[in-house]
Amino acid sequence: MKIKRLFTMEGEGPYQSMEFENRSSIIRNPDGSVVSEWERVSVPKEWSQVATDIMAQKYFRKAGIPKHLKAAKERGIPAWLQPSLHDQAKQEQEAAEADTSGDDSTISETDAREVFHRLVGCWTYWGYKNNYFDTEEDARAFYDELCHMLANQMAAPNSPQWFNTGLNWAYGLDGPAQGHYYVDPKTEEVTPSKDAYTRPQPHACFIQSVKDDLVREGGIMDLWTREARLFKYGSGTGSNFSDLRGDMEPLSGGGVSSGLMSFLKIGDSAAGAIKSGGTTRRAAKMICIDADHPDIEKFVNWKVHEEQKVASIVAGSKTIKELINELFSAIHDWGDETEKFDLKLNKDLRKVAKKARLAQMPFSYVHRIIHLAQQGYTDVLFEEYDTDWNSEAYQTVAGQNANNSIRLNNAFMEAVEQDKDWDLFWRVEKVKAKKDARKPVPCKTLKATELWEEIAYAAWASADPGIQFDTTINEWHTCPADGPIRASNPCSEYMFLDDTACNLASLNLMRFRDPKTGELDIIKLRHGSRIWTIVLEISVLMAQFPSKNIAKLSYDFRTLGLGYANLGTYLMVNGIPYDSPEALAICGAVTSIMHMTSYSTSAEMAKELGTFAGYERN
């Protein structure tokens, strides 16, 4: 492919006319205490302090980068694009000359240009290696244009790219394999990854299948392992859990199932224990359930009940804390030492004890405070809780680590409109009925309007569940020959086949706006859309995935997500009301330009490299 230069000049580098400056970056807790501090980081002068903090705190590689590097000298790769290796000999020589143990042989990233080089160099390397560019000059133009766009905040990839991409290419990092797989483009065979970083995990969005099986591959416990692999490297995942049997549903070996909710709580706890990307973000997951699942009502009301628990914990802790203080005061303020610990003789103590009983405080606490007071205690540590979403109160209850969504088809919505019944089915019965070519027998029947009301109330009271309109989603399916769309990623912008992944990038509209006229530069927008479509396609090629199925299907279908940011800002600075016909027209125009440029670029790549494997049958 030919890559034209629009933002850079050949031979001048990507940062021509740009200024970089050193800054400090400090992140504080609400109480003023320092979470982390970087005394000296280098960023473009035009960047805000917020952008500086995000780069320093989230995207800089914090440790483990060898101080001394050397080129790998890979055949067929230009010198400027060579991968790097740890120069062990130079490190040992330096340690010997300094008479040290070499403990300071690793460093961290401190300059934004190091990050830009790590990402863009890795993309360019994989693209060059796999014949995406006509010439070395095209590869160099690709590198310079992308570094320029990142430095000028014209576009950005999804977070896992910032976390993971280029750590091996730029710094020679490897580390033990984590159970990932990739497709070798030469053999098109699914291959286990040999280490953690040669192939990065650049995809943000995953949809994973889960079978109604406890411990075998593809089953419930295997899903938690696959999710952990994704969370560790900063990605998010969604699954449709509707194949799991409902509460009290018969098991093949006798007995009954513990139900959908018992397993969802395990996954919720696992996600809560893992910060995505290690120290970078919370785990992100989506739970989708079909509306005919026998446990649908429990799922709908899950977060409502957990929110009620939080309210009880917060209110109860504050009430009990206040009563504990009153009990201690009633005891120690009573003058007669022979009476102060006696509920019959100490009227103030008896009054507070009665108040505690009316407040439903466990009476064992009253006796505990009396015994502690007898031993000389004047107060006791009792935690008060609050409703901050990061607080211990929310960490204590279940269901706080996923977005919940219900899959509603047209049949359900029509049943609501016509006030009809809605049937729920045992999972095994649905499978048997399909096999026998008959209608399944329901295990329970609800009024569709009543379930709809429960969904609406739960969403109002706890912000979940969300709604995914199954029929409409599948009517827009681009590859229906390969199966239905059953779930989405946590943010729901990626809807595709189970066991596939998508990597994202976003163009910043404000950086394509002419500050004098307020108009968007369409030539630059098309150029940016083309280049970033190529980035996303190369990212599929170089990626590793958490399972064999995901590696194979993601390679075969090559889904990618290009979008834009700052539409609201663009409209605001131009004085255009957000919901006006003019705003809608601008939004439609920008979207169509980006969308069709990406499609055109995809067709251009298909002409040179071949179509994706699922193209013909769809």
Image (cartoon, grey):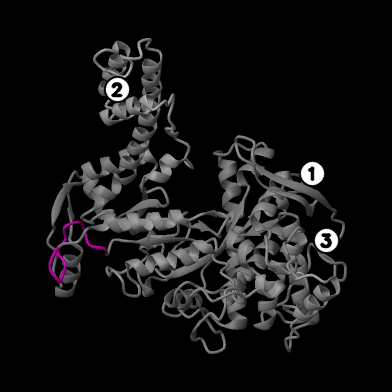
Give the residue at mark 3.
Answer: 15
Q: Position of residue 84 (x, y in %)?
A: 73, 77
Residue at 70% in and 45% down = 26
- Camera-nearest label, 3 or 2: 2
Which mark is nearer the camera, 2 or 1? 2
Q: According to the image, label 1 marks what residue?
A: 516
Cα gap from disc 1 to disc 3, whole angstroms: 23 Å
Instruction: Name the one closer to the observer, 134 or 540.
Output: 540
Residue labelled with disc 2: 356
- Looking at the rendered image, the quarter that the N terminus falls into is bottom right
Closest to the observer, 277 or 507: 277
Q: Which residues are magenta?
A: 244-255
Q: Is residue 263 left or right of residue 570?
A: left
Q: Earlier in the sequence, mark 3 or mark 2?
A: 3
Magenta stretch holds residue 250? yes
Q: Is residue 326 above or below residue 203?
A: above
The amino acid on which the numbered mark 1 sits, given as a three-letter code, is Lys
- Quadrant showing the C terminus: bottom left
Quadrant assignment, res 352: top left
For label 1, the crowd category at 10 Å Cα-Cα, with few meaning under 14, some 14 to 19 and many 20 or more, is few
Q: Residue at x 64, y 71 (%)?
A: 534
How much space separates mark 2 and mark 1, taking CA atoms? 69 Å
Looking at the rendered structure, the secondary structure element under dot 2 is helix
